[in-house]
Image (cartoon, grey):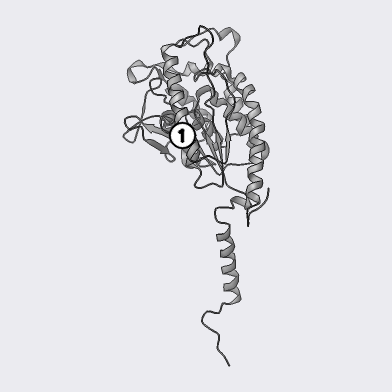
Amino acid sequence: MHKPSHLSLTRREFLRFSAVGMVVACSGCLGRSGEPRIGLALGGGGAKGLAHILMLETLDELGIRPHEIAGTSIGAIIGALYAAGLSGKEIRAQVEQFFVDQSEAERKLFALPKSVRWLDFIDPDLASGGLLDSSDFIAWLGEVLPTRNFSDLKIPLKVITAELMTGQEVIMKSGDLLPALQASMAVPGVFPPVEINGHSLVDGGVANPLPYDRVQKDCDITIAIDVSGNRTLEKDESLSSLGVLLQSFTMMSRNILLEKLKRMPPTVYIRPAIHNVRILEFYKAHEVFKEARPAQQQLASELKKAMRRFGSRPGCTTW
């Protein structure tokens, strides 16, 4: 009788290798429960970044949970709240605590026309490399966040900062969360640098204002939310020294982003049409929410299209 070849497979081995082949065929295609892995990037922009909240509410309504989040400056702060388990609506409720009463709206800070309650947490600190000190605000943020360590977040988070002396991007993704967030929002000249592990760190917008490239590798669909907005001067309007500094920083970050978009665009790119809202004008939150609502619809539409395209790939699950 002819003996079986050494290359013959048992039934169990055949099934095992077949299963492995199916996994390899869908490598990089399937996430949890057969769904694509969604990477979410939230950009910097100060008060304009409140628009991120509406985008998170849209994801909640669609039942989509990001596989990973990367954020710069205000995007890192809102991203941390979301990664810690707060919903978009819960984050909005926290932000709305800072809206001022009309009787308080005439107070001024460094030539800003109005102030908001969150600026009460920020004290002048001219001797430390910045105009303002954000320590009290960060302490308050620590009370709001359910956790203060990256390892306890429900969604992996990358906080983008930059090394002051070299401009090199520094990605924070482990250890203490609050110092990383404070560094990521440290706009040069406005807030002092934050010392972490021997590095003097500043706002991530110096190196990577919208870090969608930091989630592309591990995710199938990448969502990038650009809150840089638009700024024009009204007739006879002039910028203060602080205004010039902030506008220069905004334009620098915008130019960095435009070059990256040419080279490696994300799957879904959303830029809410936010007009004439400066970095520290958080009292315009309702105005930001109103102007960002059309972008909510755009996000839902484009994300559904991306999911359908993904689902039509061989071996992938439709949505």
Q: Is residue 179 visible?
A: yes
Above or below for 48 versus 313? above
> Quick check: 15 left or right of 263?
right
Closer to the camera in the image, 203 or 142: 203
Q: Residues within 10 Å of mark 1 (few under 14, many from 20)?
A: few
Above or below for 135 versus 59? above
Closer to the camera in the image, 244 or 18: 244
Closer to the camera in the image, 310 or 153: 310
Closer to the camera in the image, 76 or 233: 233
Above or below for 222 versus 33? above
Q: Quadrant of the N terminus?
A: bottom right
- Which residue does the numbered mark 1 point to in the structure image? 259
Residue projecting furthest to the front: 262
Q: Is residue 211 visible?
A: no
Q: Position of residue 81 (x, y in %)?
A: 54, 33
Above or below for 148 versus 187? below
Residue projecting furthest to the bottom: 1
Q: Amino acid at mark 1?
A: Glu
Please tell me which residue is depicted at 60% across the width and 50% down the height of the picture: 32
Please tell me which residue is depicted at 63% across the width and 56% down the height of the picture: 314
Q: Position of residue 109 (x, y in %)?
A: 47, 11
Q: Position of residue 70 (x, y in %)?
A: 50, 37
Secondary structure found at label 1: helix
- Residue 294: name its quadrant: top right
